[in-house]
Image (spheres, rainbow, N blue to C red):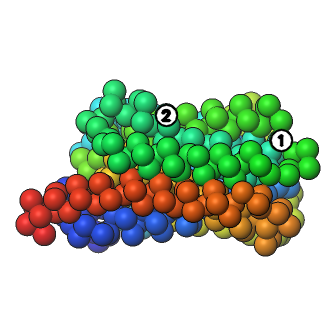
Amino acid sequence: MRTSLDAAGPDRPRAPLLPFAGLALGVLAASTSAIFARLAAEAPPLVISAFRCSVAALVLALLDPAGLRRELARWDRRTVALALLAGAFMAVHFGTWLTALVHSSVASAVFLVNTTPLWAALLGPLVTSDRPGRGTYVGLALALAGSAAITFQHDVGGRDSPLGAGLALLGALAMAGYMLVGRRVGSSVGLRSYLVVCYGSAALLLWGAMAAVGQGFGGYRPDTWTWLLALALVPQLVGHSACNWALRWLPTVYVALAYLGEPLLASGLAWGLLDELPPRATLWGGPLVLLGIVVAGRREARDVRAEAQARGA
């Protein structure tokens, strides 16, 4: 059985709007991550990270084990190395930014970790063939300005600390590396097999880190297990997988930029579920973020449409 997640190369969908729809779904799903992690706070951050990656890798592997083995048998050493590197970046990202949530508000941690497009813009030309245009940089500036307004004019009741900020920024750098590797691999291999190796290797590293620092696993309340499972299935399996698929069409900077819509959704959820009041600056910072994503997306939409037309879609 061949699933849509196995599609690569000429088999992948070619409709110009599909990458943007997939990216929107990914960002929407990813925005629940901070909320679920806070609700599962009984579990240590490394446990949360290891569990979500393990479950997502297991679900993808069980879709078609025989097909997965055939796919992996065709991999060369370079592809294996890149997938493992992506997994290492993911492990660092989760381990640092979920720990940052312990020392920061949801809004602050999510914003700082979403400075990812800044690092992707700086490092992207060195790693991939992407050359963002002027519209992308204008959109990036608008979105970062809006996110900064939302973050730095909020009342967090003393929850922020330099440690939280440093961990979230390290998480942003790791996320940029993870996305750049995913873009570099592109559609040279099936998405599902790439994600199994990426998520699986990240899980192994996180379990190792958890054991090294003595964080235990188990003995949690039933509702904690519910939120841990939600983390694995929604932001990880749906969110990250959809965004990895979008990376096969869209430049790293734009995919990372779209993630800047996450603080708006996460802050709204934090208000409704955790009684964490969003800052007043959201009223004008939020539209700036959305405007930036739209401005940058206009150029990318033209490029995707031109590619689809060239392929005869």
Label 2 environment density (alpha carbons within 10 Å; few <14, some 14–19, many ≥20): some
Answer left or right for 132 relative to 257: left
43 above or below 165? below
Residue tagged by mark 2?
A: 119
Element under disc 2: helix
Amino acid type, residue under disc 1 in the picture: Asp
Answer left or right for 267 relative to 120: right
267 above or below 116? below
Where residue 18 appears, x then y in whole percent? 32, 69
Residue tagged by mark 1?
A: 160
Toward the viewer: 6 or 236?
Answer: 236
Residue at left offset 56%, top offset 46%: 144
Toward the viewer: 12 or 66?
Answer: 12
Q: CA distance from mark 2 to mark 1?
A: 23 Å
Amino acid type, residue under disc 2 in the picture: Trp
Q: Quadrant of residue 75?
A: top left
Q: Quadrant of residue 213?
A: top right
